[in-house]
Image (cartoon, rainbow, N blue to C red):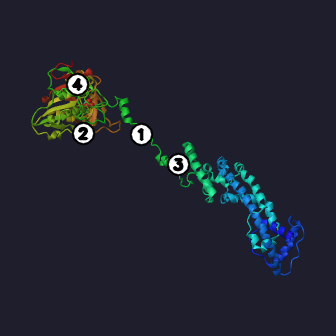
Amino acid sequence: MEKLMSRVRGKTSRSRWASKKPAPAPAEMVYSSSSSEKSSSSGRSVSSAPPALPNSTEQLIKKVLPVIEKASPIIEKASPVIERTSPVVEKASPVVEKAPPVAEKASPAGKKASPTRTKTSPNRKKASTVNEKTPTVSKRNKKSSPVIEKTSPVVEEAPPVTKRSSPATKRSSPVIVRTPSVIERASPETTSPVVEEAPSVAEEASPVVEEAPPPPTDPSIKSWRRRSSSLTQHLRKSRPKEQIDPQPPETKPAEPPAPDTRRNQHVDAQPPETKPAEPPAPDNSISIVHLIPGLIAPSHSPTWRPQPNLPTGQWNGGPPSVSPATSSRSRTHQPVDLGLHPQYPTASPRALAAHMAVDENFPERLPTAYVAIGSGPGMRDVVDMFLKYPRGRRAHIKFVSVGVASEHMLAMANLGPIMHLNHVPDGVRIDVFFDTADKVDDECNCIKGQKGSMHLDRLTAMRAEKYICIIDCKQRVTSVVSSGAPIPVEITAESYFYVFHQLRATGATVILRSGEPVSTEPYYTVRGTMMIDVSWPLVTNFVAAAKNTGDMLKMIPGVVDHGLFHGDRWILGCRPITVYVGGPNGRVNKMTPYSSSYS
Ligand SMILES: O=C(CO)[C@H](O)[C@H](O)COP(=O)(O)O
């Protein structure tokens, strides 16, 4: 009986590891009894041979049941021992819980945590560790006699841990304690789930770790995870942003939506499409004007726009006077800022001359006054000067355009009404005709037509009561023909060769004006005429007289008009009645045909 009890005691401890298999057939039991007989001979608890088994199964059961019933109290006595071993197992839990800090320091190998271990709770891990570390126990169970296990359900319901298992459980503690060191030296295949739940590592872990199955819901694990999450938040807050933000661009798309709002804000703050805008390109057009002021002269600037309602000159002389013209032939006109061209704070000498010319020849005739404006670029200064007058002061004026350029300037300045020369009523004279010239000599003879509009200029001058010319002092010459300046001649296209040979016979140099810029095609006016520039290298007495030259040019068939404005208008001449010459230092000289030469 004692032998049998010892066998039962041993089988009870092994029954924990036995699988719950159904009771085998009696025939097999007979066979297994023989096998147990073999194992008992080599086992520790059973030293002698087992008793002979009865042939009948019923008899066997009847004999075995009492034995098992007697063995139950012994098994019950083993329970306290098992209870005493449980605290040992529980003490192993804190050891496991202390693993996270170590795991956080784990090498990047921890990123590749083994998913198989993440599915097991720490307690079950310990058990599995025990199994791995104590293979002999399992072998003993397998080698133990299955007779009692398979015949007695009581044994199968015995506590899972027995005296023999407790030492093995105790031996498992050092294994668990060594877990951190194992983690530290862990290879990607042997990393524990602690690494998987380590916050700092898991945050930067590869998608494999983030896609791991949810952790078990063991209470101890819950508390551990709670502490881990708090630790994660602390690390995120304490870590500099530069360490969080830089991530390889290839890992960002694989990231699931992160709960960290700071990271989202960073991503939103630097999207590819929100790159800082490039600085605007500087405006070089204004710089060009300032760097090369002489390139675009105030009067010739293509970007000219009329400057209405600008304050009168504040520079060095106060506002320009709008007083009636003085009787002085030449007076000093203080340079003033007319506001004509902001890039030139000081008006040009010709602008000052235009200021004086308009000031002294402002038409006062009521109810209607006619003012003609030439087509030269210098007329912009005259237009700007008219804009300085109040609208009521110039309401009675009708402006006569001389060509398209003149009409354009008047329209841009909103000066009006504008009319063509042919619209001026017959028998009505134009009050004043403001114009410019290329050259003006001592007798107020002029050379005009460098822009090709001398024909209209002459027609307008012939109908003007006052023909006022405004020039710069650099355009003053002693004699217009003797100066060698080319004289523009407008001819018909069909008469070119004839006019060319007639002028060559007088010793003249004839140049056919080409298109702008230089072109192989000749320049044609709006009337379809061509322009030639004639000069005399050897100036004879006959040619020196502008009247003689002008009359000669008029006598050649094919010549429409020429640029010599000489004589008096009542004898087919159209010298200006007054020439305003803008000089240096704001000095403006005034010339008349009947006055002495330039002083
Ligand atoms: O005769 C002209 C046009 O045919 C011009 O009045 C002359 O060429 C002077 O031009 P600018 O106003 O540029 O001095």
Which of the four quarters of the rendered structure image does ligand 1 lie in?
top left
**Helix, strand, or loop for circle 4?**
loop
Taking 229 as reference, is 109 left or right?
right
Q: Which mark is residue 318?
A: 4
Circles 3 and 4: CB distance less than 8 Å? no
The vertical placement of 297 against 107, above or below, is above
**Labels 3, 1: front one:** 3
Cβ–Cβ below 8 Å for labels 3 and 2? no
Give the distance between the C-alpha atoms of the residues marked 2 and 1, in whole angstroms.
Answer: 31 Å
Disc 3: which residue: 263
Residue situated in front as seen by the camera: 13 or 136: 13
Dot 3 lies on which element? helix
Circle 1: residue type? Pro
Give the vertical position of 421 relative to 291 (above or below): below
First in sequence: mark 3 or mark 1? 3
Mark earlier in primary sequence (4, 1): 1
Q: Nearer the viewer, mark 3 or mark 4?
A: 3
In terms of depth relative to the viewer, which is nearer, 133 or 382? 133
> How far apart are labels 3 and 1 at the CA level?
31 Å
Q: Residues within 10 Å of mark 3 (few under 14, many from 20)?
A: some
Q: Quadrant of residue 501?
A: top left
